[in-house]
Image (cartoon, grey):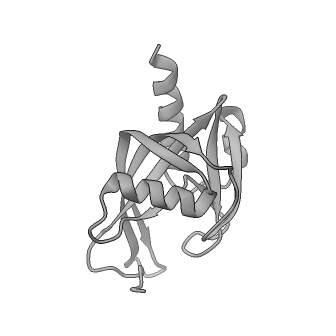
Amino acid sequence: MKTRRYPRHPLPGVGALIFRRGSVLLVERGREPLKGYWSLPGGLVETGEKLEDAIRREVQEETGLRVQPLRMFEIFERIIRDADGRIEFHYVLMDYVCKVVGGEARAGDDVSRVEWATRAKLRNYRLTEGTLAVIERAFDARRNRT
């Protein structure tokens, strides 16, 4: 496997905004980078893989859930610098709102835990940079879609 550290180009990734009864699904990262942080389920897009196929694969690998992507919600960059200021990681992340079509939520692949978190409890999690903001925007968009 190629290293993700100090990439020559940004790496494309996908994330899933999965809601259930007022909660959103979070995963605790089981590996570096950002081991121990909570984020949305997702990961890197493989060469030749369509974005929606990548989100289905990543969510199933990490959580055991089968999902249907409904729409792309947001695109953002995650740039992590090392102690010397060099770019150690650079991801371009496309987050999709998804609905569950099967399976049971459980930790898998490179995830140590999965939890359904209410909006009120989100600040109790050690979230990756930008994750809280995108989840709050998605909660607001859901509320305004009536």
State the residue in front, 124 or 106.
106
Question: Could you tell me which residue is drawn at 65 percent across and 29 percent down?
Answer: 22
Residue 113 in the image, given as x and y percentages of width and height: 72, 60
Question: Could you tell me which residue is drawn at 51 percent across and 43 percent down?
Answer: 17
Residue 30 in the image, given as x and y percentages of width and height: 65, 70
Question: Could you tell me which residue is drawn at 55 percent across and 58 percent down?
Answer: 60
Q: Is residue 55 something one can see in this rendering?
A: yes
Q: Quadrant of residue 41?
A: bottom right
Q: Is residue 27 above or below residue 135?
A: below
Q: Quadrant of the N terminus?
A: bottom left
Question: Which residue reaches farthest top?
Answer: 146
Q: Is residue 126 above or below residue 141?
A: below
Q: Quadrant of residue 88?
A: bottom left
The number of numbered badges drawn on the structure is 0
Question: Could you tell me which residue is drawn at 67 percent across and 42 percent down?
Answer: 122
State the residue in front, 84 or 94.
94
- As drawn, is 131 to the left or to the right of 104? left
Residue 124 in the image, given as x and y percentages of width and height: 73, 46
Q: Is residue 77 something one can see in this rendering?
A: no
Residue 39 in the image, given as x and y percentages of width and height: 57, 55
- As drawn, is 6 to the left or to the right of 31? left
